[in-house]
Amino acid sequence: MKTQVAIIGAGPSGLLLGQLLHKVGIRTLIIERQTPEYVLGRIRAGILENGTVSLLREAGVAQRMDSEGLVHHGVEFIFDGKRIPVALSELTGGKSVMVYGQTEVTRDLMQARSDCGAPTIYGVQQVEIHDAKSDHPSVTFEKEGEKCRIECDFIAGCDGFHGVSRQSIPRDVIREYESIWPFGWLGLLADTPPVNPELIYAHHERGFVLCSQRSLTRSRYYLQVPLSEQLDSWSDERFWGELKRRLPDELAIKLVTGHSLEKSIAPLRSYVVEPMQYGNLFLVGDAAHIVPPTGAKGLNLAASDVNYLWRILTQYYQHGRSDLLTTYSRLALNRVWKGERFSWFMTHLLHDFQEKSDFDRKMQEAERQYYLGSRAGLTTIAENYVGLPYEKIGE
């Protein structure tokens, strides 16, 4: 098999990259270890930054998002029972975020790729990357016992944290940065109307709460829990009861409960690998970085990587700009680290830490008072939440 760009991973980042490249006439082949049904079954993010929304529109896959997604112009924080609105659009010159689930984004991208006839091979095994540093890299894999080989110009590793792409880079040429957070998030998805029109980030002495949503009829709630918690000890009734205890009374009485569609406990991790490129292999999304979900940056940072890689490869194929190929890692990491910083900041702002000293607790309290009591502080939160601008390519 021959193609121009081999893409490993058919999650949203791989599919979005493939769609953008296809639209400018660059041939791609996507391979994926799982089945389409498995990929669509992953319950993930639901908040799309301003730039991610624009990128989906540019890819021509935004029709359903624009008709069914919910534009949000604000979010809300709760500290000491006091509700603090953050007027995103007012503070950022009109920018907003879109509430539209990652599952739906993936579904739209899958449909678009199918409609345009671009190839995706699901259910592959034994994926290996060869000669990434050469001008003729390749990818081999097995499909139903048959060994296959893709010859290509470039490889995009969009295969997640546990994928083969990052593991194919020699350990002595990369540096990993990591922080493991001392708690997890217990998440519940339910077909119930959201408790509030805007998302709520609530600090409480019993633990952090996020009241999120996927639509006007589907809600996603999270509770901060110790890492020692076991999922089977959390019945739906226990979850709803604990959520009510952590919300102000005027919200708790409005909360509509129901049967959980999905429930899981996720540990929180911050992780970045540098560089995000090895020869003609480019790492994209979770293959290169992980953020705690507090800042709603996971999918959005993956889209940011796609934005840079797509534009660089387009410049290379259409204008011969081989000089831009080595700029990918620097451009991507500039934005990744800002996203990591915001996620780190939000996690510290909203969670209590058992091991903090009295001094650290006082500093945390002062930080909350400043950022949420100052227009400048709220503007900083709003600018990062809606998404910092992308850098221009090739100028």
Image (cartoon, rainbow, N blue to C red):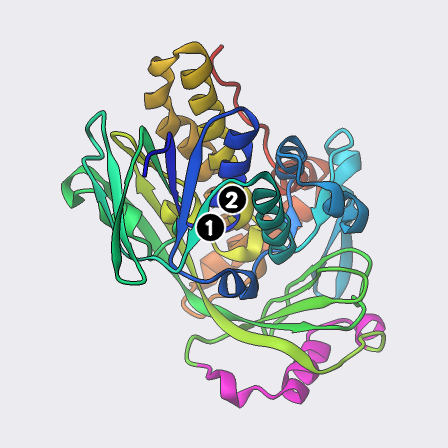
Please state if 246 lies on the left or on the right of 179 as rendered. right
Q: Which residue is mark 2?
A: 15
Badges 2 and 1: C-beta atoms under 8 Å apart?
yes
From this viewpoint, is residue 131 visible?
yes
Residue occupying image coordinates x 62% and y 43%: 115
Residue under the point 71% across and 43% down: 97
Asked whether residue 245 is drawn in magenta, I would say: yes
Q: Is 276 or 316 nearer to us in this picture?
A: 316
- Magenta region, residue range: 229-252
| Numbered disc 2: secondary structure | helix
Q: Residues within 10 Å of mark 2 (few under 14, many from 20)?
A: many
Say whether disc 2 or disc 1 marks the residue closer to the N-terminus. 1
Residue 171: % across, % down: 17, 45
Question: What is the tally of numbered marks visible in this picture?
Answer: 2
Indicate the quadrant where residue 43 lies: bottom right
Q: Position of residue 31 (x, y in %)?
A: 39, 49
Badge 1 is on which residue?
10
- The local crowd at label 1, few if under 14, some if 14 to 19, many if 20 or more residues have their Cα within 10 Å, is many
The residue at 30%/46% (across/down) is: 165
Locate residue 239: give its quadrant.
bottom right
User: The N terminus is located in which quarter?
Assistant: top left
The stretch drawn in magenta includes residue 113: no
Amino acid tagged 2: Leu
Q: Is residue 366 among the parts visible in the rendering? A: no
Q: What mark, if any, has residue 35 been given in the picture? A: none
